[in-house]
Amino acid sequence: MSRLLSWKEVPVAGWLEKKGNAKEYETGDWRTIKPVWIEKNCIQCLRCFVYCPDLAILSQGEKVAGIDYQHCKGCGICANECPSKPKALEMVAETDSE
Amino acid sequence: MPNLKELMQHESFFSPGHRMCAGCVAPLVVRQVALAVGDTPVVVANATGCLEVASTIFPYTAWRCSFIHNAFANAAATLSGVETAYRALKKQGKINKEIKFIAFGGDGGTYDIGLQSLSGAMERGHNMLYICYDNGAYMNTGIQRSSATPLFADTTTSPAGQVSSGKSQWRKDLTAIMAAHNIPYAAQVAPSHFMDLMTKVQKALSVDGPSFINAMAHCPRGWRYDTREGVELTRLSVETCYWPLYEVDHGKWKLSYKPKEKKPIETWIRKQGRFRHLFTDKGQTEIKWLQQRVDEEWSKLLERCKEVG
């Protein structure tokens, strides 16, 4: 879980020092189910990349490279939209994945 | 046509770690807009709403671009001021960058509360793009009806029960209202058809003058469906012709997507808990009404676009 900042760490007067620093806040612990990317099934259609509301599909160059579990909220849109057969994204229960 | 593989190389102006609900389609709209914008510098204004509240929780911000929020009612007015200041500074030679201006508002902040400031900004002809993400109610404050809520939807201020069957009015056709301002570009989009969305955003940013885009944004919390179905349902809203994709380019109406087979409205509303009360014996007449009204609106649009039905 993301640690709350102490009063000494919070910037003075509502000033934000970094742009887009929400990235430092982890929303991955909201998840109850998680997507698993199966590379060998992936056809690189990039749909999961375009449809992920949390920008949690990692890319490298022009290809999908994995999932950002720090920010993925486990909504399941990526697995639902994955067109490849068999699917390259599957949802598994968070507890079963260890 | 935007080149996705090229656009994905740029850092998005919207960052992960925003605290919109899991499965919310509104950040998906912003994400696709950010993809379409690429590396063009932008200034974003936000009306109060889910997006503003959940993306700027202190001491974090999900925006990598310049961002301004003022009040619920005046995202368009605020941004038109910023745009005017930019033009003045440019004239004085103090800025020489090309900057684009984008405002985001929910349906509450656009259809209802922000309508007059939006109308004013469009009429004055500011060089800005206003994007409304329409999730069909005041989701941020607890699912109260707005003028974008569909007919017969159950919300906390139009509750379905023994006497009422949800909201009793049809939704406001905001895209047509904006087109009636005679602005250079107005369009309706859905994130399920992302190429269409990105093309329209690029087009809207390239015109000289104000432009308006109305985007469908499903809300799993308020519409009561499984989070995984967000994009699937968005696609259905287009296929059932409840949310047709079209553009009004310099006064010319053009249909962007015509479903091969028009699906019955029932296929879309069946999956949403807010229409649950219609799936009883007495709800059948209401579904018929709904279908009839959707058909009427669709044929009206076909006529405007000079398409044959």
Image: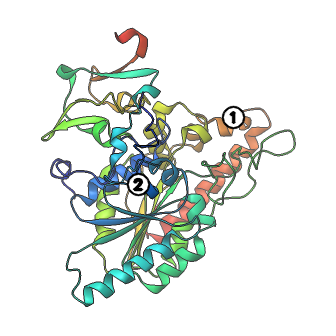
Q: Within the image, what quadrant is residue A68 found in?
A: top left
Please state, as top left, top right, bottom left or bottom right, where the N terminus of chain B lies in the image: bottom left
Residue B102 seen in the figure: yes
Residue occupying image coordinates x 38% and y 83%: B84
Marks 2 and 1, the one that precedes in the sequence: 2
Which of B37/A68 is in front? A68
User: Do the dots labelled 2 and 1 sit on one chain?
Assistant: yes
Residue marked by disc 1: B276
Q: Looking at numbered disc 2 in the image, what kind of residue is underneath it?
A: Lys
Give x and y (percent) for residue B284: 73, 39
Along the line of sight, which residue is nearer the eye, B301 or B227?
B227
- Residue B244 percent location from the top left of the image: 47, 56
Q: Is residue B150 above or below residue B272?
A: below
Q: Residue furthest left?
A: A61
In percent of the image, x 68 and y 58: which residue is there? B170
Q: Which numbered circle lies on residue B258?
A: 2
Chain holding disc 1: B
Indicate left or right for A2 with B42 as reference.
right
Q: Residue at x 42, y 84 (%)?
A: B125
Q: Chain of mark 2?
A: B
Q: Position of residue B167 (x, y in %)?
A: 73, 51
